Image (cartoon, helix red, strand yellow):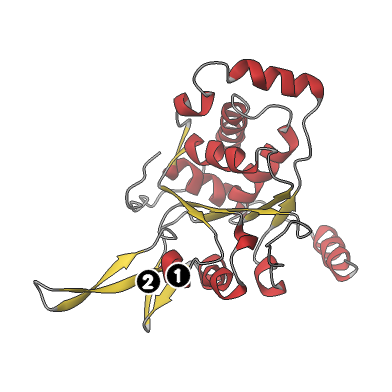
Amino acid sequence: MSDGEATAVPDAGALPVAEAADLTNRITDNVERVIVGHHDAIEHIVVTMLARGHLLLEDVPGVGKTMLARAMARSVDCSFKRVQFTPDLLPADVTGVNVFNQKTREFEFQPGPVFANVVLGDEINRAPPKTQSALLEAMEEGQVTVDGVTRELPDPFVVIATQNDVEQSRTYELPMAETDRFTKKIRLGYPSERDETEMLGRVAGTHPIESLEPVATTEELVRARRTVADVEVSEPIRTYVTRLAAHT
């Protein structure tokens, strides 16, 4: 995992189905070294990444939402940025800003944390709607417009956002336009007594996430996405999905 600028991924074809399946298993197993008792949630995140989507983790504080997002980002060798959403966070703090260079006498663009392959938006509903909206263009179109100039975001680009229950104090409900950008919204729930006991044993020394190494490359993820996109969906399935969406 890199905290620097995202690099371009070489143009390559889709992964063979067997290799794509192996990739998902490697990522899932790696994350489970840190996150205990949330196998289904981990699979949801992997599916979302392969589907070119974004994920919203909603739950009460202290159930491991941020840790799960960090572990997923560490498992794929790509750039990662974290944004802690607070009431005083500005849109420019997310997208970037033009700064005047005294030496060159010109404005230079300083990219914000959104310019990364995996962006963790931590406690996104603690920021006001104006700041939340800074992610809309990025999530929908894979680009950011600042002062009239549009800049492409790296590929792959995935937003993993966490939010506390809206009943919690000092939170803002996400607008419909933003929730629509998320492919999935899941809840983790409290771990079982057995899982919690196992977690306590794992963090007795150094936290396991500090030694978590990447098990997949950005190129592999991009190629696996192409594999998913090549899957043929029959007419009955498309009809079922359309009807299901219309009734929810």
- The quadrant of the image that shows the C terminus is bottom right
Q: Residue at x 80, y 22 (%)?
A: 193
What is the secondary structure assignment of the residue under circle 1? strand
- Amino acid at the residue labelled 2: Arg
Q: Residue at x 60, y 18 (%)?
A: 202
Above or below for 229 versus 61: below
- Residue most toward the bottom? 148
Question: Does residue 199 appear in the picture of this structure?
Answer: yes
- Residue most toward the front? 169
Judging by the rendered image, the residue that carries numbered circle 1 is 143
Is residue 21 or residue 180 the one in the foreground? Answer: 180
Q: Are marks 2 and 1 in contact (CB under 8 Å)?
A: yes
What is the secondary structure assignment of the residue under circle 2? strand
- Amino acid at the residue labelled 1: Gln
Above or below for 173 versus 9: below
Give how far across and how far down residue 124 sits, in percent. 60, 59
The answer to whether residue 118 is left or right of residue 35 is left
The answer to whether residue 245 is left or right of residue 150 is right
Give how far across and how far down residue 150 sits, in percent. 38, 77
Give how far across and how far down residue 63 sits, in percent. 70, 38
Question: Does residue 14 appear in the picture of this structure?
Answer: no
Specify which label sits upstream in the sequence, 2 or 1: 1
**Label 2 to label 1, Cα distance in Å?**
6 Å
Above or below for 71 versus 164: above
- Residue most toward the left? 103
Above or below for 36 versus 128: above
Is residue 88 or residue 207 the one in the foreground? Answer: 88
Judging by the rendered image, the residue that carries numbered circle 2 is 151
- The quadrant of the image that shows the N terminus is top left
Q: Residue at x 64, y 15 (%)?
A: 201
